[in-house]
Amino acid sequence: MIRRNVVSSNHLHSLLSGLRIMAARLRPCIGLVLGAALLSGCAQEPVIHAPSRYAAYARLIPPDRLLTLSDGARIPVRIWPAKGPEKGRILALHGFNDSRDAWEFSAPAFAASGFTVWAPDQRGFGAAPERAGWDGTERLVKDAREELMQMARESATAFGHIPVWLMGESMGGAVAMLAASGPQAPSMAGVILLAPAVWNLGPIGRLPAHLLADIAPEGALSGHELPVHVVATNNIAALRRLYFDPLTLHITHFRALRGLVDLMAQASHAAKSQHVPTLVIYGDRDQFVPPEAMAHAWRHFPAEVRRDLIPGGHHLLLRDREGGRVVDDILSWLDHPDAPLPSGGDVSAAVWAAENGAQPDGPAQGAVQPFPLLPSRLDGAVAP
C-alpha cells in the first residue's frame, strides 16, 4: 500500500520524467507517442475505496465558503482563521492534481501564529469548475489575482489593511510567480514559493505532451504506465491522505499535461521578474523539480529574493515529517524578513549555490545566496 500511495497519488512525477524519455526517443521511436495515445482510453478516474482503518484519510471536508470570480466561476475555499490578533492573510495555492486540502497539515500552525490561511481549489482541480481539465495558464493566474484582491479587500480594518501574502506549492508556486510579476500584478506584502514548478523541459521535451494532447485531447494516463517511482514526502500519513482524499485527481488528461509543461516553462522564464519580497524554499531530496531546473531559477531570481534550502526535504515540504522546520522558516521570514532563518537554510542555500553555479546574476551587497545537496535525478530513477 505504501508503494501504491507514493506512485498513484503523485503520478505527475512519473509522467514528467516519462516525457523526457519519450522526447529523447522521439525521432527513432515516434510510435511511443502514438502508442500512448492509443492506450490512453484505458485510463479512467478510479473509484478509491478506503479500508475502514483509513476512513479518516478519505473524509470530504466541505469548503468554508465559495468565491465568485469575474467569469462567474464559484471556487471552493478552506479557511483557517488566525488565532488571536490577526497579523496577516495568506492565499495558499496547491499543486497539480491536489486540492485545497494540501494545507491542512501546516495551516493550523500559521493560524496559531496569527496568520489567516485561505486555500482555494485551483480551477480544474479539487471541486473547482472544469475538474480534470485545463482552462489555461492565463485563467489560473487571473484566478489567483482575483482571489488575492478579494482577500485583501476583506482584510480592511478601521486601522487600515492587514498585509496579504501569496504562497504556492509546486504548480501553485509557478502560478504564484506569474501572478506576482508583470504590470497587472496586484499589491501584496510578499510571496512564498515552496518547490515551485520551474522545470523547463525545452521545446523538444515539451513536444510529446503537445503531440499527445493534439492526437487525443481527452486521453489520459495514470502514471502506472511508466517505470518511474518517486517519493513526494516521507510522511506516510500525508501520502495516505493525498491518496484517499476524494478531491485528489488520480489521472492526468493530456491537455492538462500540456498545460502544465507550458506553465512550468513560463514560470522558469518569470524568475527574473520576481520583484516583490519573495522567499523560495527547496528540499535537497526533491524528486520532482530537478536540481538543474531549480539552479536555473535561483540563478535568475533577483539577488534580493531569499533562498532557503531544507536538507532532507522532499517535494511536499510542508507535509514532510520534519515540515515544522519549513513552517518555522516561513513564520520567521513573515515576521522578520531580514533575520537568519531558524533552520539554517541560508547557509545551506549559499553552499549549494556555490557548488551548482546557482548564484544570482549580479549579487547585491549582503544578499543571501542559495544551496541544496540535491537528490537523485528523476531520470536516474527510471529503469533501463
Image (cartoon, rainbow, N blue to C red):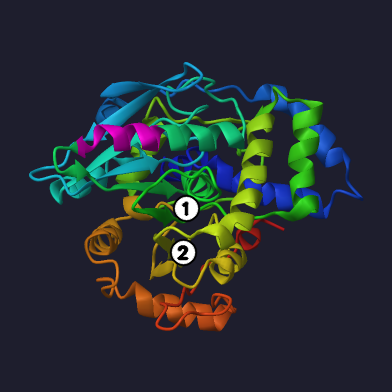
- Indicate the amino acid at tag 2: Arg
Secondary-structure class at tag 2: loop
- Indicate the amino acid at tag 1: Val
Q: Are marks 1 and 2 in contact (CB under 8 Å)?
A: yes
Q: Which residue is mark 2?
A: 285
* Disc nearer the start of the sequence (1/2): 1
In the image, residue 33 sits, relative to residue 109, either above or below, namely above
Among the 4 quarters of the image, the one containing residue 194 = bottom left
Residue 146 position in % (x across, y down): 43, 32
- The local crowd at label 2, few if under 14, some if 14 to 19, many if 20 or more residues have their Cα within 10 Å, is many
Quick one: quadrant of the N terminus?
top left
- The local crowd at label 1, few if under 14, some if 14 to 19, many if 20 or more residues have their Cα within 10 Å, is many
Among the 4 quarters of the image, the one containing residue 78 = top left
Residue located at (45% from left, 55% from top): 315
Can residue 292 be seen here? The reply is yes
Q: Nearer the viewer, residue 75 or 229?
A: 75
Magenta-tinted stretch: 147-156
